[in-house]
Image (cartoon, grey):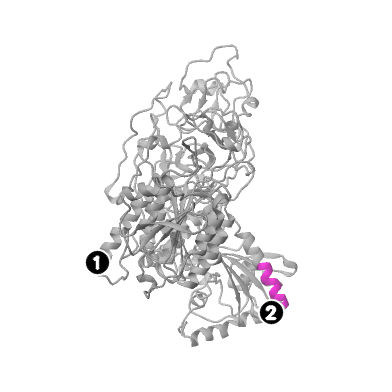
Amino acid sequence: MANPPPSVGFSVTISPSNPDIPTPRPEPIASPPPLTFPSSSGPRLPLPVVQPNQIPSPSFRTPTLLSPANGIKPGSPAPHLSTPPRPPVFSSPLQPAAVPFRTSPATPQPVALSSGSSLPMSSPPPPFSNGSAELQNQVFDATEELPLAESPNVLFSANKVLKQKKLANVPSLGFGALVSSGREISPGPQIIHRDPHRCHNCGAYANLYCNILLGSGQWQCVICRNLNGSEGEYIAPSKEELRNLPELSSPFVDYVQTGNQRPGFIPVSDSRISAPIVLVIDECLDEQHLQHLQSSLHAFVDSVPPTTRIGIVLYGRTVSVYDFSEESVASADVLPGDKSPTQENLKALIYGIGIYLSPIHASLPVAHSIFSSLRPYKLNFAEASRDRCLGTAVEVALAIIQGPSAEMSRGVVKRAGGNSRIIVCAGGPNTYGPGSVPHSYSHPNYPHMEKTAFKWMENLGREAHRQNTVIDILCAGTCPVRVPVLQPLAKTSGGVLILHDDFGEAFGVNLQRASMRAAGSHGLLEIRCSDNISITQVIGPGEEAHTDSHETFKNDSSLWIQMLSVEETQSFAISMETRADIKSDFVYFQFAFRYSNVYQADISRVINVRLPTVDSVPAYLESVQDEVAAILIAKRTILRAKNFSDAVDMRATIDERIKDIANKFGSQMPKSKLYRFPKELSLLPELLFHLRRGPLLGSIVGHEDERSVLRNLFLNASLDLSLRMVAPRCLMHREGGTFEELPAHDLAMQSDAAVVLDHGTDVFIWLGAELATQEGQSAAALAACRTLAEELTEERFPAPRILAFKVIPFKAFFNFLQMRGALRPDTSFRILYQHSKILFCWHFKIFVVCTLQEARFPQLRTLTTEQRTKLKCSFIQFDDPSFCEWMRSLKVLPPEPS
């Protein structure tokens, strides 16, 4: 059966706020404006069940301590500015990603405040009013020019917005933002230990773009223009005084409520209480796979912090839960795997004398003895036909996480910070017990059973999310694991599913990084933007929040998203449109992430952005961020590529997109039907060319399971990882151990060169044929390239494979593969590199090195005539179009090289 499609988008119609209604005080209402779901939008996303006490309160009081014990993480860089949205269509193929957003130091921005008030400080503050004339007489215009700041957390596809609706809403280019919660920030001016000031009308937060009446302390909301009080906090003799308030000087602030103000909070000595980790391990492995897995597991327990509580569960036909109270021998309680555990079984397990979660510092020798006691599978069954009760094992793991543990103090169980985590180490499909599928695809009832298993796994993942537990599934080996069945278990819990070739190095690194990911819980994202901007689609690791999960305001038209987990490596792709021609000089956006972090603190992270509006199309195109625009286009495209057939159709949509952008924004060549692609968007077509031929849409990855996993990773990935997965980064090794960054074109593949190609989930080291024959230089270059690859991917999750190739001449390699039957005689150069998984952008058929090649690949100018001839002769002719040929086939000329 085909992989079940991810959640589709839906349209939301929300009544706009009415700024003319005076609101002297907050008036929470029982329910928000009704949501309308047109029948054409497809099925609704299921609404998560959220308890009201899971959502942080908007009222935060000032704590007495500024320490890790009170929820503040030291030593992290402070982030910086960008933009938000509003009423939307929300599409969500849920899953976490990898790689943090770029960081840049936050520089406080000057606040647009009145330099003086017409009201003397001794006079009493006037009553609340929405009178615009009164406001303009007393307040400095907040539209004064402020420098545009960049944010690692919010990245827009353009730094300006077109005023004309018709041009701004050209779907082929689009407008939107990539949004990430980002890293923890260190104590400093961006941290606020008090309640935020929020608009009584729409719920927006006070920020540096608000107009403020200095004499009364009233502030005007930039979203709905309502005038609000500040309880006297914004009363000041001058705007310089107010610049000392973080929310009025910085676009990025954290409102923090620490646990020492919660009723019943029990302080603990550890500044960070590690949430428990339960390893759920497949015991149906052959000897070679088991040896690699044992090595990875031994390294894992040696690497985790000593206070981390760990549990070990094995599964086959039965479920074995290991007891850490037995120090001399590996001992386990065994439960049947053919059905879900009964309450009697779980009570006997949880309330018994065994210890199933134990801190590493107390149980490290026991953990090593358990791993050493594992034995290979002995029965004579193929890997895919072995009984594995993965679903039952995960249910048992959830039960021991939620049940009483040995770590109790005076009858009070410590509260773990962040999400608990279950890490499944799987070598095959779930074929036994609940959520299982038949061993063979040829089973007459397989489609129905797969659909039933999909639904059961999805519900189990939702239950794990309700219990604040993330499930990561790390698969390895050559046995198909039935990704369509396992994916929803990881996805709905906020976890990730990753495929590995074996249980070796890459698996071990991902096991360690999965356990160390800082994950917040109870995450909500609220998005607001100016009335003339609407949100049309959201793609990312979340779903529409249930109305019970957050408070509502009188005219709140914001979008609320339930985040499945809160991690810095995730991002949401938000597409926007303008509702009508824009009259104002600026549009405003506000994003607020609300979650509980691993230090037991409740955080409201507020990011504000203001973008200027322009009439000039060239000015708008100059502000377009090619990389962000390309990734937004790619995510919208990949969302629709649910299988290989869809992927082929999506390649055609990319072709049409290129033609439409050239037609709308480019220029027609004289006496020709050709259009020149706009020079302001010079990187965009090349990035889309990479997308249509790479592993996400192309045929370079062999199995549909692999493509499905890659697409789910991509749809939730941050900009950095997304870029690498679309277009690889190419670095050529130079003498002295330095590296030069080059365009990812096949021209970089020179016989005397070593090249590092970072493709996100894989990093390739390519050694040219001539260099490979020089043993000393080859070894030095390989060592330098491997060191660089490790540095580039040090914090990336999933950790990529690092593969090195010593290349024989291309023609010899081609003939070798042909003789082995790996390639047909008409196989193209692209398919040749499918076998080595190296994805260069082939720009030219290299028979003559021309001026255009030199303009796009300047390093060619450094080659001698002999080197150019050698490079030209090393390539083979094939029918796959180059970048320039592809553009010309669309009746579009590539943009002029800058």
Q: Residue lying farthest front?
A: 328
x then y, percent, for residue 102: 59, 50
Viewer-side label of 2, 1: 1
Q: Residue furthest bottom?
A: 819
Q: Residue furthest right?
A: 736
Q: Give the numbered dot on residue 867.
A: 2
Q: Which mark is residue 227?
A: none
Residue at the top extreme? 123
The correct choice, above or below, for 58 with respect to 721 in the image is above
Which image quarter is the N terminus in?
A: bottom left
Q: Is residue 451 left or right of residue 888?
A: left
Residue kind at label 1, given as amino acid type: Asn
Residue 523, horizontal then vertical, whole percent: 45, 42
Which circle marks residue 445 in the picture?
Answer: 1
> Residue 452: x and y, percent?
28, 58
Q: Amino acid at mark 2?
A: Gln
- Residue at 40 percent of width and 47 percent of height: 352
Left or right, 597 with respect to 462, comes to right
Taking the magenta stretch, the answer to whether it contains residue 371 is no
Badge 1 marks a residue whose secondary structure is loop
- Per the rendered image, the range of residues in magenta is 776-785
**Within-10-Å neighbours for mark 2: few <14, some 14–19, many 20+:** some
Identify the image quadrant of residue 635.
Answer: bottom left
Query: From the viewer's perspective, is residue 136 above or below residue 772?
Result: above
Instruction: State whether residue 727 appears in this view.
Output: no
